[in-house]
């Protein structure tokens, strides 16, 4: 395993650490009503790829410890089964039936943007960062953005982020040894990767930059959004330890090593928060943006008991790990089956900052659940996706999935059948009718992503 020493960038000496501790303790007392918020998101990591979610293959001691010291959700969800729209639901508090981005690309734009038909955030889209900035937070995004390329209306600086470093284009983010990244709109040349060299692994750059951001803003409330690129393919990592001797294909070894490397960096971040005296005034979230790809399901059981993975609205495509730690506020070692989804992040952050969310948000604040209080069950969860067209609704333990609007509805009782293996739609026509009504109501027409009546090649 590699040696971890990035905190030297920020602290340097024990005396420096002590001084930082004293200063931040004063700040923490002044701003206790506005906690620092760190939101970490893995990319394409499965629900069951963590030890605390039952993995028998991937080592994640720091995230397991985070769960032991905080709250673990069993029934948390991404807002979409792929990258771009999942991030849109997270940032805007709108589900995919209302949001600006509902798939990674838009076929209707192919004539205009033949290579990358992307839909960026609109100028009037309110984000978690824009809300928190108005509440006095320093705001930063480090990693993979995916909601607006350079020159569009969707770049992070136009949506509340004071600082950003990383990839804007989601396909550029597949290159872990790219020769450049972007910082606040300016190219950062990575000379160690020029000419085919592989000396600067971008995930390591993000992990180090996150520590620097925390150090720079230790004396004021901050929001740090960390959408890490790992373990998304290309499955490239500087070292496949501790899985080198596993009887797995090399991409599987690399995938597991990418998760463990990220886990190490999260552990280092948690240690830094303690060193700077920020631990008790910082809430840290960890999740993944969507389900895993099929090779990892086969070799690592990455989707656990669930059916499907990335690109489908079955549980394996959208059920996400969610761990939340906030010492002194969240009880250690707790587990909840409360249903939450990405579009709850915006109203929850607003609640923590003491401000009102936009009136049109589709989410709810889950702060009561985080603090161990009883919270009424939500009315429903909603998803839609377009390659191929799919809609899904969860109400209580009932989950409905359909493709075209006139294709058969599938209905599952997740309490008895979490793997969605037994379609019971024919036995519950009243529930099917209720689900169809939610699907019709929650989809707003969009020129880029129209619903279709029938999906060709649909498989039961």
Image (cartoon, grey):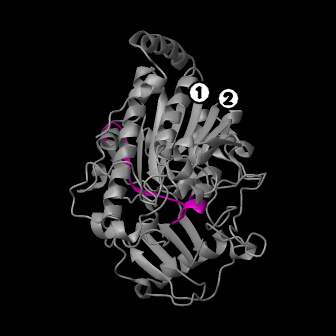
Q: Is residue 83 left or right of residue 449?
A: left
Write down the residue under mark 2.
136
Q: Earlier in the sequence, mark 1 or mark 2?
A: 2
Callout 2 secondary element: loop
Q: Quadrant of the N terminus?
A: top left
Q: Quadrant of residue 354?
A: top right
Callout 1 secondary element: loop
Residue at the front extreme? 195
Residue drawn where x is 68% and y is 32% of the image? 135
**As displayed, is residue 28 above or below residue 189?**
above
Nearer to me, 442 or 107: 107
Residue 230: mark in rendering: none
Q: Are marks 1 and 2 in contact (CB under 8 Å)?
A: yes
Question: Badge 2: few (under 14), some or many (20 or more) residues near its Cα, within 10 Å?
Answer: few
Nearer to me, 190 or 42: 190
Residue 279: percent from the left, percent from the top? 43, 26
Residue 428: percent from the left, percent from the top? 44, 83
Residue 221: mark in rendering: 1
Q: Magenta segment: does it hold 67?
A: no
**As displayed, is residue 24 above or below residue 136?**
above
Q: Is residue 352 visible?
A: no
Residue 37: percent from the left, percent from the top? 53, 35
Nearer to me, 404 or 180: 180
Nearer to me, 195 or 189: 195
Q: Is residue 429 visible?
A: yes
Q: Magenta segment: does it hold 73?
A: yes
Q: Is residue 212 left or right of residue 108?
A: left
Residue drawn where x is 42% and y is 53% of the image? 338
Q: Is residue 121 left or right of residue 2?
A: right
**As displayed, is residue 93 above or below residue 34?**
below
Residue range corresponding to the magenta coloring = 68-86
């Amino acid at each position: 395993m590699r040696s971890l020493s990035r905190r030297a960038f920020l602290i340097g000496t024990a005396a420096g650490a002590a001084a930082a501790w004293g200063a931040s303790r004063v700040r923490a007392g002044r701003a206790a009503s506005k906690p620092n918020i760190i939101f970490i998101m893995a990319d394409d990591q499965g629900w069951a790829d963590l030890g605390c979610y039952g993995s028998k293959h991937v080592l994640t001691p720091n995230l397991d410890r985070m769960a032991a010291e905080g709250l673990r959700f069993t029934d948390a969800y991404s807002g979409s089964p792929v990258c771009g729209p999942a991030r849109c639901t997270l940032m805007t508090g709108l589900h995919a039936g209302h949001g600006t981005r509902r798939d990674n690309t838009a076929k209707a734009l192919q004539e205009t943007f033949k290579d990358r038909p992307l839909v960026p955030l609109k100028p009037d889209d309110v984000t978690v960062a824009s809300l928190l900035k108005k509440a006095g937070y320093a705001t930063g995004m480090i990693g993979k953005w995916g909601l607006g390329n350079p020159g569009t209306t969707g770049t992070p600086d136009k949506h509340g982020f004071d600082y950003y470093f990383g990839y804007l284009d989601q396909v550029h983010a597949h290159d872990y040894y790219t020769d450049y990244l972007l910082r606040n709109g300016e190219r950062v040349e990575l000379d160690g990767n020029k000419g085919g060299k592989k000396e600067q692994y971008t995930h390591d750059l993000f992990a180090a930059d996150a520590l620097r951001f925390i150090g720079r803003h230790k004396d004021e409330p901050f929001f740090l959004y960390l959408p890490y690129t790992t373990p998304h393919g290309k499955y490239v990592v500087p070292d496949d330890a501790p899985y080198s001797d596993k009887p797995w294909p090399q991409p599987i070894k690399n995938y597991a090593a990418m998760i463990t490397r990220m886990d190490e960096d999260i552990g280092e971040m948690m240690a830094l928060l303690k060193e700077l005296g920020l631990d008790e005034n910082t809430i840290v979230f960890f999740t993944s943006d969507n389900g895993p790809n099929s090779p990892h399901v086969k070799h690592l059981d990455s989707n656990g008991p669930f059916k499907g993975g990335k690109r489908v609205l079955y549980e394996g495509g959208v059920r996400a790990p969610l761990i939340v730690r906030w010492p002194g506020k969240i009880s250690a070692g707790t587990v909840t089956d409360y249903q939450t989804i990405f579009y709850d992040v915006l109203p929850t952050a607003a609640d923590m900052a003491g401000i009102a969310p936009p009136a049109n948000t589709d989410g709810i604040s889950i702060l009561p659940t985080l603090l161990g209080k009883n919270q009424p069950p939500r009315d429903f969860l909603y998803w839609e996706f377009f390659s191929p067209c799919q809609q899904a609704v969860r109400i209580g333990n009932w989950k409905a999935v359909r493709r075209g609007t006139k294709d058969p509805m599938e209905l599952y009782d997740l309490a008895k059948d979490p793997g969605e293996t037994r379609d019971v739609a024919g036995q519950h026509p009243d529930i099917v009718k209720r689900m169809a009504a939610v699907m019709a109501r929650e989809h707003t027409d969009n020129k880029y992503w129209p619903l279709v009546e029938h999906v060709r090649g649909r498989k039961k």
